[in-house]
Amino acid sequence: MTPSLGLKAPAPFDLPAGLRETTPTCQRAAIHHVAGQAEWTALDWPGLVEALMALGRTDIPLARLTEGHVDALRVMAEAGATPDPDALYGVWASRSGGTGLSGKPVRGGWHLTGRLLFASGAGVLDRALVTVWPEEDRHLLLDVAVSDWSFDTSAWRTRAMEHSRSHRIELDAVVSARQIGANNFYLTRSSFFPGGVGVAAVWTGGAARVLDLLAQSTDVPAAVSDPRRVRLGRARTDLASAVALVRQTAIALRASEVGGARDSAGQGQAAEHQERLRTLATLCRAGVGAAVRRILEEVRALAGPAGLAFDEDLNRAVDDVELYVAQQSQDGDAAYVGGSG
């Protein structure tokens, strides 16, 4: 997509009504449909965030799944690996709450054990990039077929983001897999911290979708009174701020790709450069996260009980974005930024 210098979020992708169904078959078709509207691995940072904002503005759970697919393709391209043709991918690398996979090579593949949380796209995706920890200080990134893995749907207790199918997986099995990149590649690659900017771009697009649905809702009174105009004005200002922050960060990331010397082992970027990337990405995520939360607060007040109770699309979108942006650690990011030079 062509980067913009304005403050408006890009328009959503084309998504026919028939592809907004939430069955696994429809979701697979929808991911293929929207993923086919950009050359994701060829995009520079400004082009990537434009496409990701458009994706978030199209459909929020679908954007979560498609962003994971796109991220996997770009990670493999960075490692010089080729994805399986036509396969839908995800990145299952969460170690939330001390979970994660351990593994060791055995005859016939890899013996993987452990618990995966937030395995988005379970039952929809063909393959996933999973992080495996043979030892505490060494991890590997494996490309694994996951279409036949079992998963626990009962653990997800909220309607928010339920259509992202982010289920829990308990694993103790030997699987066929190929390693992507060298040992410790995933967490030391140059795009690890900047990848969070891509997620922030999806949050921004999701906030734009919430405002779109608010404007379209027949259950929400028009903003004709001064207090309602004030709230809508604040929400639109916060959206413009998030859009500007994402775009400016993308420009800085593109500039950072020139140079960036590698360390003596050839793995990852020099520590000082990597720290600058982390600071840049953290500031963007923290700023966008705060803006999106303020937008949701204003939208709830503008929608009122009728809009939240009777408008299914608006209600879901608000809940989806709220849970999605909750992955940003507000206190952790603030502490990091406050402690950085």
Image (cartoon, rainbow, N blue to C red):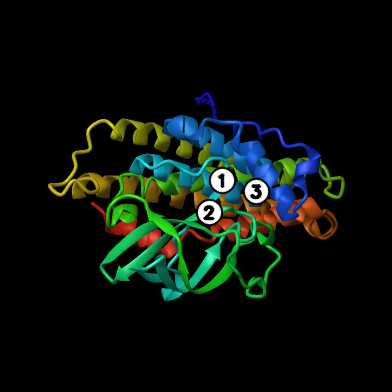
User: Quadrant of residue 163 in the image?
Assistant: bottom right
Residue type marked 2: Arg
Residue type marked 3: Leu
* Mark 3: secondary structure: helix
For disc 1, the neighbor class at 10 Å (few under 14, some 14 to 19, many from 20) is some
Pair 2/3: label in front: 2
Q: Which disc, if any, is residue 87? A: 1
Residue 82 rendering spot, x and y as whole percentages: 42, 41
Structural distance between the alpha carbons of marks 3 and 1: 16 Å
The residue depicted at 38 percent of the width and 51 percent of the height is 282
Q: Earlier in the sequence, mark 2 or mark 3?
A: 3
The residue depicted at 57 percent of the width and 50 percent of the height is 292
Q: Which disc, if any, is residue 127? A: 2
* Mark 2: secondary structure: strand
Tell me if residue 235 can be seen.
no
Of 299 and 285, nearer the camera is 285
The residue depicted at 27 percent of the width and 65 percent of the height is 138
Structural distance between the alpha carbons of marks 2 and 3: 17 Å
Q: Earlier in the sequence, mark 2 or mark 1?
A: 1
Residue 45 rendering spot, x and y as whole percentages: 42, 34
- Callouts 2 and 1 close, C-beta under 8 Å: yes
The residue depicted at 74 percent of the width and 48 percent of the height is 26
Q: Is residue 270 left or right of residue 281?
A: left
The residue tagged 3 is 62
Q: Is residue 319 left or right of residue 261?
A: right
